[in-house]
Amino acid sequence: MLEALNISAAELALAGVTICLAVAVQSAAGFGSALVAIPPLVWLGIPLPKVIALVATVSVIQSCMGVRDLRASVPWRLSLTAVGVMVVGLIAGLMVLRVLAGLKTEHIRLATGVILCVLVGLQCLWRPRPRASLHWLWGAVAFLSSGFLGGVCGMTGPPLVIWSMANDWSAAKTRGFLFAFFAMANPVGILLLCLTFGPQVLPGVVVGIAFSPVIYLGAAIGLPVGNRFEKERLRQFAYGLLFAVGLSAIVL
């Protein structure tokens, strides 16, 4: 495992802590595992394609746990439609990732940090009044941009969060939609990632599966929190944490 990721035992332990925190945040808020985990894992020197594969695998496992917990609130048809549209943007994003993967680590850190801060800033500034029905074009833009960002840096969540928060949904339905989307979309993303970069990304998948006990712990912490607290409070907490991660990626 250490050789596959080119990190030390201490760095592997740090990666485990990062994954646990990322899973706890996503379990509570419905999103955030990639936003929390990717910058620190890139800092450790793990190649970006492997990091994306690792975090996507972690997200699949966590999201399946979330779907099981909120299965009565999941809008399955809408989630499946979102995944279908997302794939188009994902393919375009992966083409851009082929260019980013050749950059130096410090450039990748800067890029992921800037992207993270911009996305979190947009979510904090643009807070539309929830509506019972949104025009289909807004959904198409959100799903396509989600796929593109997922391909470029593994961060599919922010456009989906902005769009889902604009819907007049309960906190349970919002989280259920996001969990179902990630559970179905990330396996597709991993497959396309393997087709784009070859078997070099498979160690990330293997390590993600090996982190299952850590994922279970993070989900056990986050899911009860998300079920108990109001969505607004959780969103404020998640945004603050994500912005701090992005800022540190730019400064350090």
Image: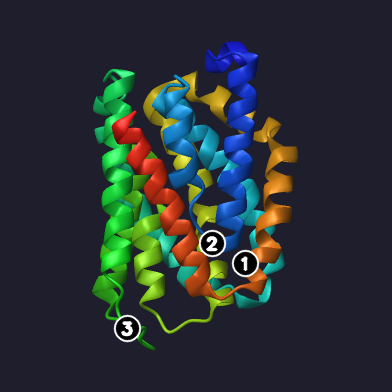
Q: Residue 226 carries which label?
A: 1
Badge 2, how many Cα within 10 Å: few under 14, some, many 20+?
many
Q: Name the residue under label 3.
A: 129
Amino acid type at mark 3? Arg
Residue type at mark 2 is Gly
> Residue placed at 57% from the left, 22% from the top?
203
Mark count: 3
Query: What is the C-alpha distance between the residues marked 1 and 2?
Result: 8 Å
Using the numbered discs, state the Cα–Cα distance from disc 3 to disc 2 in whole angstroms.
20 Å
> How is the structure coloured here?
rainbow
Q: In which quarter of the image is the C terminus?
A: top left
| Whether residue 80 can be seen here | no
Horizontal and vertical percent position of residue 16: 64, 32
Q: Where is residue 134 in the image (x, y as percent from the top left)?
A: 31, 82
Q: Disc 1 or 2, which lies upstream in sequence?
A: 2
Q: Assign a secondary structure to mark 2.
A: loop
Q: Where is residue 101 in the image (x, y as percent from the top left)?
A: 31, 24
The reply to whether discs 3 and 2 touch (Cβ–Cβ < 8 Å) is no
Mark on residue 30?
2
**Which of the marked residues, 3 or 2, is nearer the chain's N terminus?**
2
Q: How crowded is mark 3: few (under 14 residues within 10 Å), some or many (20 or more)?
A: few
Q: Residues within 10 Å of mark 1 (few under 14, many from 20)?
A: many
Contact, CB < 8 Å: mark 1 with mark 2? yes
Circles 1 and 3, Cβ within 8 Å, touching? The answer is no
Amino acid type of the residue that numbered disc 1 sits on in the rendered structure: Gly
Is 173 located above or below residue 133 in the figure? above
On-image quarter of the N terminus: top right
Residue 161 appears in the figure: yes
Q: Nearer the viewer, residue 142 or 228?
A: 228
- Give SS at disc 1: helix
